[in-house]
Image: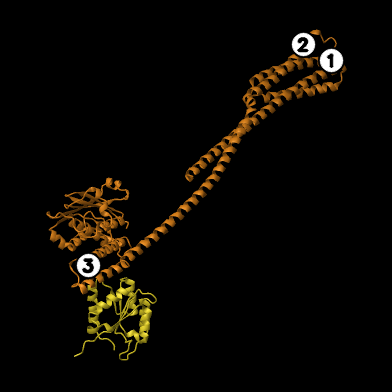
Chain colours: A yellow, B orange
Amino acid sequence: METKKILRLLIAEDDEDDRLLITKAFQKCIPKENITCVGDGEELIQYLNKTSLAENCIFPIPDIILLDLNMPKKDGRTTLQVIKSHEEFRKIPVIIFTTSNLKEDILITYTLGASSFISKPSTFGELVKVTKEIESYWSNTVLLPT
Amino acid sequence: MKIEPSNQLSKVKIYSIITLFLVVVGSAVSFWVANRIKHYTEALEHTEEVLRTTDQLYAIILERETNIRGYILTGEQAFIKNYENSLAKGDKELNHIIFMTSDNSTQQELLKKLGILIKNRVRVFEISISYYKLFNTIDGYVSPGKIANAITSYREIKLLIDQINGEEEGRLMDRNESLINNIQVLPLVIGLISFFSILMGAITLYSIFHYKKTSKISAEKIKDYQDILNEKIELLSKSNNELKQFAYIASHDLQEPLRKITSFSDLLKEQYDEKLDGEGKFYVDRITSSTLRMRLLINDLLEYSRVGQDSPESINPVNLEEVLQSVLEDLEISIQEKNAQIKFKDLPVIQGKETELRQVFQNLISNSLKFSKKDVNPSIAISSSLAPFELIKENSQLDQSISYYLIKFEDNGIGFDQSYGERIFIVFQRLHGKNSFEGTGIGLSIARKIIEKYGGIILAEGFPDQGAIFNVVIPKTSNN
């Protein structure tokens, strides 16, 4: 019997409060050490460039990326484009996690290769529900590349 | 400066007509005067010729006398020849005068007399010549009586010729008396007419020039107004865009901190529930309910701001009875809960967007259901008719040249004082505390905004504790 996979999560979110809330919510189903946060697109790319497959590496490759759209320096759209045109990183599923619900944003991110588009819930309860669904879906329902 | 180019133009026209009239009158008068002068000149020439001919006749008569005397004194045949020539010449001149005065009976009468006198005189001459030829002298023929006769008849001839001349001159004077009297005034009359013609011409020219100038000024003014209008339109569309942006900001940027307040208070409640005492829990609940209400307000405001924005839905004939049916289906639970009676009949089909019209019906009916009396089953009657002209006339937003439907929503709810008839349509305005009735108070504002977009109006009539009537006035053919 297969053991349950523990997801490794990389969150790109410029808002400190949101980072805290999202991390708190995910911590209900994912251990703290499996969750990494970066403040913008540039930091995210820098992080990915430092990753390696080696065991106990301080920069492990994430299983999924949670990407905010509106961020300083490099915004979510550009960052998504960079990830999806990278030979190695393009295989990592990217979940857009944003306050925007604009049709154009939804269309362009899916076109660029996003795996999901999720509008940030407005209460903590709902946020917990959504993070649980994400965790359950990506660790149980689907198979990820290794 | 008030500019009326059309007035200026009619002035120019009037001036031109007056000028033309003056020129025509001036020309007619001049032509008439020229004709009169020509006629007078001809008459004058005629008279002069008559006078000259009578003078010649007189000269011939004198020549005759002279030749006769010469012959009698000298017996020279040359005198006789001259005398005989003068006879023919005299007849010719006399006939000429008779011909020239043929239209004057007085003159003909005088000439007849003259002819007889001349003939008599010639006869005396002929006798004298015959006597001389017979006796080679005139002695014994001439007597004092004959001499007296000769003098008398000569005088008579002279007198008659003077009379003929006088008659001719008199006739000339009689016939042209008015012309001769007016000939001094005529140049003045023509001069005056010419002066006024020139003056009117000048005024016309000035008016045309002025008109052109005025038209130019009006064109410039119109252009200025157009520029101002364009500026205003630009400003309006700019402020419209800003408003849309504001709505976007309100919905997104304002929701952001709100979401955090909610989330952190949730988190607080979740993680520190045991540590909070009764009052602490109460405060957190107040924070949660306030943020919930704020979110409702923001969402409603956003919805309100979206009314009137372009939507992809096209304009179609919308059957309002079908719209109402589907609204009633949507509100089924609340209708059943309140045991409400909803009646309607003969609702029209109008041009519009179904979503918008459905929202109007939904908001009005929900409003009636919400403000029903606690102990009475709500009853709502919806009817339609053509809007009476007085109603259209009373409301300046309506166009008197088109027809409207009047759709009445009558309920038996708690009603309201008529002084609040307008206030209830203002965004977030409420007549009751938010604890007594749920909702933010935007439903009626949205309904009104939609109907106004269609070129119609909504009017509310309130009867405290009896009910309310909402009158929706909407164009028969929508220009949406």
- Which residue is under mark 1? B132
Q: Quadrant of residue A113?
A: bottom left
Q: Position of residue A48 (x, y in %)?
A: 35, 84
**How far is the residue under mark 1 from the one under mark 3?**
178 Å
Asked whether residue B316 appears in the rendered view, the answer is yes
| Rendering coords of residue B98 (x, y %) | 68, 23
- The residue pinned by badge 3 equals B284
Q: Nearer the viewer, residue B40 or B449?
A: B449
For label 2, the SS is: helix
Q: CA distance from mark 2 to mark 3?
A: 167 Å
Screen quadrant of the C terminus of chain B:
bottom left
Q: Is residue B408 left or right of residue B100?
A: left
Q: Is residue B441 left or right of residue B2?
A: left
Q: Secondary structure at mark 3?
A: helix
Chain of the residue under the numbered disc 1 shown in the image = B
Q: Residue at x 85, y 18 (%)?
A: B70
Q: What residue is drawn where x is 64% and y is 31%?
A: B187
Task: Identify whether B378 is placed above or below A9.
Answer: above
